[in-house]
Image (cartoon, rainbow, N blue to C red):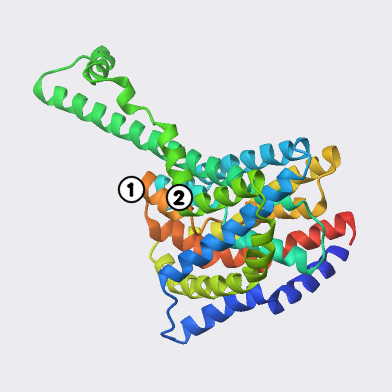
Amino acid sequence: MDFLSLFVTDFIAQLQSPTLAFLIGGMIIAALGSELVIPESICTIIVFMLLTKIGLTGGIAIRNSNLTEMVLPMIFAIMVGIIVVFIARYTLAKLPKVKVVDAIATGGLFGAVSGSTMAAGLTVLEEQKIPFEAWTGALYPFMDIPALVTAIVIANIYLNKRKLKEAGESVIEESLSKQPVAAGDYPSTRQEYLSQQKDPADNRVKIWPIIEESLRGPALSAMLLGLALGLFTRPESVYKGFYDPAFRGLLSILMLVMGMEAWSRIGELRKVAQWYVVYSVVAPFLHGLIAFGFGMIAHYTTGFSMGGVVVLAVIASSSSDISGPPTLRAGIPSANPSAYIGASTAVGTPIAIGVCIPFFIGLAQSIGGR
């Protein structure tokens, strides 16, 4: 009952917090047909400032902290990002009407990190005065990049294998149509096809360009820039005078925009298999619980704070709304954006922000006490 009461209390508080209030407000005005439009250029600046601030916070904290304390949470962040993609590959992809490449792309998006959800989680922890390591924001790229790279690599391997299989079968059928072929000749026919390929390396997936593309993306670029500036320079004056005071106001505007976008994408989600709705409701909790479990291991072995465990769970429960979509569109062009973006933005993000944040805070408090 302690956990339930804590969850209900935190959920009600979250409903009253500016973060979720603006998200719900955006959904309401979009549902009412409001013509309010926030220019994309303004959203780009807001996202840049938010992620730069988070990067600066992490960089400054890393500079002033013991690096050995960060190793285990970073390893766990990488593991969670990869595990999430494989979960989608062997669960969502097996469901009726779900295409494998769409499921893999969805797993990649849910394995990657939402900067806005992470910012919301950090804000709630600060508002409730729950201590956490300041460098936990720097875990973002350690989960984000491996998830996106894994999804793109797995999707391309799957597509290459399918093309090879289809091409091999077409060669066999063509050979059969031209002349009788004994049963024992089938393997040699496929082998003849394989031997005609120009270079086996043509079918290999090049991983480094994918990593490079992710690093050049606007979200990770802003995050890594702030991280590097906080780590190697002394930006405390501009941080305290500009980025920190503006953070919550800018976040509220971004939440308003995301609320409007979430409502607009509900229609897109209806066009694809309804299993995506089920997945996007269950996945944030499942992924967050996996990360929470890893975080507890770090808590008992290295003294990782319970607030840090919550941050790790929150970023795992999130789904990328900034860096992920353009990266996946480029890396898996055959995947349907209405499936993976609709599932993430219309359902996954509101669940992660509105329910998972208070859920994991309540879980941590029930285990570790207030």
- Residue 302 vs 132, above or below: the answer is above
**Residue where numbered disc 2 is placed:** 217
Please rate how many residues cluster around mark 1, counting C-alpha atoms within 10 Å: few if below 14, some from 14 to 19, many from 20.
some
- Which of the numbered marks, if any, corresponds to residue 250? none
What residue is disc 1 on? 334
Q: Position of residue 115 (x, y in %)?
A: 58, 58
Where, by quadrant of the figure, is residue 161 drawn?
top left
Q: Residue at x 50, y 47 (%)?
A: 108
* 171 and 244: which is toward the camera: 244
- Measured as percent of width and height from the top left, residue 329 is found at 38, 51
- Type of amino acid under label 2: Gly
Point 50% across, 73% down: residue: 257
Examine the rendered structure and indicate whether residue 226 appears above or below residue 176.
below
Whether residue 348 is visible to the viewer of this picture, yes or no, is: no
Q: Residues within 10 Å of mark 2 (few under 14, many from 20)?
A: some
Q: Viewer-proximal residue, 47 or 340?
A: 47
Instruction: Give the residue displayed 75% in from the left and 75% down from the top.
Output: 13
Relative to 135, is 196 on the left or the right? left
